[in-house]
Image (tube, rainbow, N blue to C red):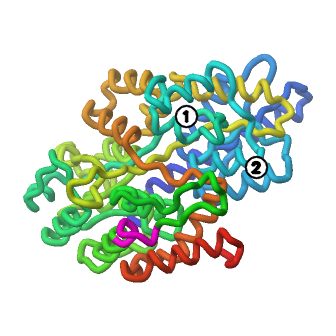
C-alpha cells in the first residue's frame, strides 16, 4: 500500500474509533435507565463522522439513533446484514446498502417498502421527471416497488496528470478509449490505476467495460436464476482484451492483482515520476485537494492544478462509455420493532442537507439534483467536475439488478481473477459456463 493508502487507512481507523466511542457512550447511557427506544443504524466506513452527526440530529423525543459500524468491504457488509436479516433480527432498523444489495434484500422480504409521496418522487425520477438523479433512483426499485431511499450517488471518472496527457498528445476535451489511455501511459513513463483485486470493485470495472461495448454480464434478471448469461460475447471479449493489454503493459502498476480504490491514489504524484491515469470514485478529488504537501499527495498547489478529470474511458472508439454507478441507499429492516419511526428516521438522514454535508465534508456526492445545485453553488468543487459527475450517474451503467447478484459477482471474480490470467479467447466463455452452472445449482462458489 502506498503512503497515501496508509494515510487513508489511518484516517478511517481514527473515525471508526470515534464512532466506537460514541456508541460506548450511548450504551452506557442506555444502561443508566433510559427507556427511550433505540434505532440501530448500520453504516459503512465512508462518511462515518457525518453519520454520527445526523444520528444525533435526527434523533427525536420518541427515539434515539445509534450508529453501528459495518466492515469496510461491500462483500463483508452484505454478509453481516444478510445474516442478521435472515435471522429476522429486530434490532436491524436502518442500513446503508450498496445499490446491488437492494434487489436481493427486497426479494427476500427483508426491507420495508417505501410508500406515499416519496415513493412517487423516486419512481418519477427513474424517467427523469423527479428530483432524484435517474441513475440513483433506479438502484432502489424492485418488482414495481421502491425499497430504499438514495443517500449518495457515486460514479467513477478518469483522473489524470495533465502533463502526462499533454506529453502523450491526448486531447482530453474529447472522449478517450482504454486503449489510448494504456498506450499513452506506457509510452510516456506513466501508469494506469484500476481496481483489480478479487473483490466487488473488480466486477464494477468489468461490468463498465462490457456495457461500454454494448453488452451485459447477464440480462433478463427478473427471471432470477434463469437469467440469460451474456458475458461470452464480443463485448465480454473486448473487456478481457483491455484487461490483458493492461496486465501485459509497462503501464500496469506493480500491485495490479491486489489494487483497490486506495492503493492507486499515491501513484498520481510519484516522486520523480510522470503520474498516472486512474479510474476512481468521487472521493478522490477531496483526497488530493486536502492532501497538498502530504506524503503521496500533490507536493504543492501547482501540482494540484496538474490534476485533470474526464469522462470514464470508452471501451470502443466512437461509442459512449458507461461509467460505473454506485453510492449508498438507506433501507429499513422489515423486522424492526419500530417500523414507522425507522422510516421517519430514514427520510431525515437522507435529507437534502445531509446530502450536501456528505458531499462537502466527505466527497460523497448527492442523489438529488437540488442537493447537487447547492454543492455546485458552494464553490467546494470545480463546476465542470460537478456536472461531469451528475452526467456520469445519469448516463452510467448499473450493475445487474438481480436477487442473485451476489452469486453473479462471485462467479465473475472466480474466473476473471487474477487479471494476469485473463485471456479474451477463453475467459468470457469459461466464466459464462461457470456462472450458468452456479445459477443452476450445478457448481459451488
On the image, the x and y values in percent for residue 80 come to 72, 55
Which residue is under mark 2? 108
- Left or right? Give the position of 67 relative to 153: right
Q: CA distance from mark 2 to mark 1?
A: 22 Å
Quarter occupied by the C terminus: bottom right
Residue 234 magenta-highlighted: yes
Question: Which disc is residue 439 wearing?
Answer: none
The kind of secondary structure element at disc 1 is: strand
- Left or right? Give the position of 162 relative to 205: left
- Left or right? Give the position of 291 relative to 9: left
Out of 89 and 138, give the one closest to the viewer.
138
On the image, the x and y values in percent for residue 331 come to 67, 38
The kind of secondary structure element at disc 2 is: loop
Residue at figure coordinates x 42%, y 82% from the top left: 426
- Would residue 357 be seen by someone viewing this image from the given angle? no
Q: Look at discs 2 and 1 and give the one toward the viewer.
A: 2
Q: Which residues are magenta?
A: 231-237
Please state the total of marks drawn on the protein image. Answer: 2
Quarter occupied by the N terminus: bottom left
- Left or right? Give the position of 86 relative to 350: right
Q: Quadrant of residue 179?
A: bottom left
The correct choice, above or below, for 63 with respect to 73 in the image is above
The correct choice, above or below, for 175 with respect to 217 in the image is above
The correct choice, above or below, for 265 with respect to 308 in the image is below
Question: Which disc is residue 151 wearing?
Answer: 1
Amino acid at each position: 500500500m502506498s503512503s497515501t493508502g496508509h494515510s487513508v487507512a489511518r484516517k478511517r481507523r481514527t473515525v471508526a474509533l470515534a464512532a466506537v466511542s460514541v456508541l460506548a457512550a450511548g450504551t452506557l447511557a442506555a444502561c443508566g435507565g433510559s427507556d427511550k427506544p433505540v434505532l440501530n443504524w448500520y453504516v459503512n466506513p465512508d462518511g462515518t463522522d457525518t453519520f454520527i452527526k445526523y444520528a444525533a440530529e435526527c434523533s427525536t423525543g420518541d427515539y434515539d439513533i445509534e450508529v453501528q459500524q459495518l466492515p469496510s468491504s461491500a462483500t463483508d457488509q452484505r454478509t453481516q446484514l444478510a445474516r442478521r436479516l435472515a435471522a429476522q433480527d429486530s434490532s436491524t432498523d436502518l442500513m446503508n446498502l450498496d445499490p446491488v444489495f437492494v434487489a436481493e434484500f427486497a426479494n427476500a422480504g427483508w426491507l420495508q417498502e417505501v410508500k406515499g409521496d416519496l415513493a412517487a418522487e423516486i419512481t418519477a425520477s427513474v424517467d427523469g421527471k423527479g428530483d432524484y438523479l435517474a441513475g440513483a433512483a433506479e438502484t432502489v426499485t424492485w418488482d414495481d416497488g421502491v425499497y430504499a431511499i438514495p443517500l449518495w450517488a457515486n460514479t467513477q471518472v478518469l483522473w489524470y496528470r495533465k502533463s502526462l496527457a499533454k506529453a502523450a498528445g491526448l486531447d482530453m476535451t474529447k472522449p478517450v478509449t482504454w486503449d489510448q489511455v494504456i498506450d499513452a501511459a506506457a509510452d510516456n513513463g506513466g501508469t494506469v490505476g484500476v481496481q483489480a483485486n478479487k473483490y466487488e470493485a473488480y466486477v464494477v470495472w468489468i461490468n463498465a467495460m462490457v456495457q461500454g461495448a454494448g453488452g451485459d454480464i447477464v440480462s433478463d434478471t427478473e427471471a432470477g436464476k434463469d437469467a440469460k448469461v451474456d458475458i461470452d460475447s464480443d463485448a465480454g471479449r473486448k473487456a478481457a482484451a483491455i484487461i490483458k493489454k493492461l496486465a501485459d503493459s509497462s503501464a500496469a502498476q506493480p500491485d495490479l492483482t491486489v489494487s483497490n480504490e486506495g492503493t492507486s491514489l499515491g501513484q498520481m504524484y510519484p516522486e520523480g515520476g510522470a503520474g498516472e491515469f486512474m479510474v476512481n470514485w468521487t472521493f478522490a478529488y477531496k483526497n488530493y485537494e486536502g492532501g497538498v504537501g502530504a506524503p503521496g499527495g500533490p507536493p504543492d498547489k501547482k501540482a494540484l492544478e496538474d490534476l485533470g478529470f474526464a469522462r470514464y474511458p470508452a471501451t470502443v472508439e466512437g461509442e459512449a462509455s458507461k461509467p460505473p454507478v454506485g453510492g449508498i441507499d438507506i433501507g429499513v429492516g422489515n423486522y424492526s420493532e419500530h417500523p414507522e419511526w425507522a422510516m421517519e428516521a430514514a427520510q431525515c438522514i437522507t435529507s437534502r442537507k445531509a446530502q450536501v454535508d456528505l458531499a462537502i465534508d466527505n466527497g460523497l456526492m448527492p442523489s438529488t439534483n437540488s442537493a447537487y445545485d447547492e454543492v455546485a453553488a458552494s464553490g467546494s468543487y470545480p463546476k465542470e467536475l460537478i456536472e461531469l459527475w451528475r452526467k456520469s450517474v445519469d448516463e452510467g451503467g448499473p450493475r445487474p439488478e438481480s436477487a442473485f447478484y451476489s452469486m453473479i459477482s462471485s462467479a465473475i471474480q472466480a474466473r476473471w481473477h487474477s487479471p494476469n490470467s485473463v485471456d479474451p479467447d477463453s475467459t468470457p466463455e469459461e466464466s459464462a459456463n461457470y456462472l450458468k452452472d452456479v445459477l443452476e445449482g450445478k457448481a459451488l462458489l
